[in-house]
Image (tube, rainbow, N blue to C red):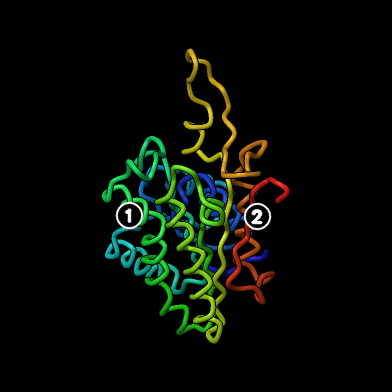
Amino acid sequence: MKLKDKVAIVVGGGSGIGRASATLMAQEGAKVMIADLVIENANKVANNIKAAGGEVSTIKVDMTKEEEVNGMVRVTLEKYGKIDILANVAGGSMGPNIRDSLGPFAESTKEMWDRIIDINLNGARNCTRAVINHMMERGSGKIVCFSSIAGVQGLRNGADYSAAKAGIIGFTKALAQEMAPYGIQVNCIAPSGVYSERMQAFATRPRGGGEQQEQKPGFGPGMDISRFALPEEVAGMVLFLVSDDSNHMSGQTITITGAGN
C-alpha cells in the first residue's frame, strides 16, 4: 500500500475529485479526514470507504472561514495524532453555493469577485496555513492544491476564476521553495472540465426546446476537448503526488486536459 499509516485531510472530499481521491487514498492505506461544506455528502463517501474496510472520519467545514479550518486540523490531530497529507480539492466557478453561470467581466460585481477568490484561493490558503507549522515541525508532508486550465490560459467570461486559479499556481511555486528545507512537497493539478456531481447539472441540461444535450467544455483556443475527465482519472494524479513516488518533485503544476497541447 502506497499510503500505509499516513493521515490525509481531503478538503472537498464529499464529491467529484475529492470523493475519488479520498476513496483511493483509503484504499492505499491512509486514514482519511473528509472535510466538506455539505456533511451529508462527506458521510456518504465515508460510509462507502468504511464498507470497503477503510478508516475514515468526516467534518463539516467552510474553508473560507479560518476558525473552522483551524478546528478541522485540531480535530484531525486529536483523532489521528498527525497530518501527512493535505489535498485542497474544494473550489469551483459554478454550481450550488457559487453561481449559476459565468459572465463578462464588464458586468461583474465586486461581491462575486470576492466570493470566487475566497472559494478558490483564500480557502486553499486557510487550509494550508492551518497545517503548515505541524508539517514543518515533523519535517515532512505532502500538499496538493487545485488550479484549473483556466488559471493557465484563461477562461472567457471567467476572469475572476482564472485570476484565483492563477494565484494557486503562484502560491504553489512560492510555498514549494519555502518548504523544501523542511522536506515538504507542494504541487498543483490544473484540470480542464471534470464530470463531477456538480458539473453534471451543467453538462446535460435543457436547451433549444428542452432537449438534453451534452455540452463540451471550452477552455480557450485548442481546448474544446472531446469529453469531461472522470474524477477517478484525476484522483490517480493526486495519489501520485501524495505518495513517495513524487518525493523529488515540488512546485509543479500538472495539467490534465485530454487535449494534445
Where is the N terminus found, in terms of image quarters?
A: bottom right
Q: Which residue is mark 1?
A: 62
Furthest-top residue in view? 209
Q: Which residue is nearer to you in this view: 104 or 179? A: 104
How far is disc 1 from disc 2 in space, using C-alphas? 26 Å
**What amino acid is found at the position of numbered circle 2 in the picture?**
Gly
Residue 113 falls left or right of residue 42:
left
Q: Secondary structure at mark 1?
A: loop
**What amino acid is found at the position of numbered circle 1 in the picture?**
Asp
Residue drawn at the location 65% of the way across and 75% of the way down: 247
The numbered disc on residue 154 is: none
The x, y position of residue 18, in whole percent, is: 51, 51
Crowding near the residue tagged with mark 1, few <14, some 14–19, many ≥20 C-alpha atoms within 10 Å? many
Crowding near the residue tagged with mark 2, few <14, some 14–19, many ≥20 C-alpha atoms within 10 Å? some
Contact flag, marks 1 and 2 (Cβ < 8 Å): no
Residue 95 vertical placement versus 171 (above, below): above
The x, y position of residue 29, in whole percent, is: 60, 62
Furthest-right residue in view? 260
Q: Is residue 53 visible?
A: no
Residue drawn at the location 49% of the way across and 81% of the way down: 178
Q: Which residue is mark 2?
A: 236
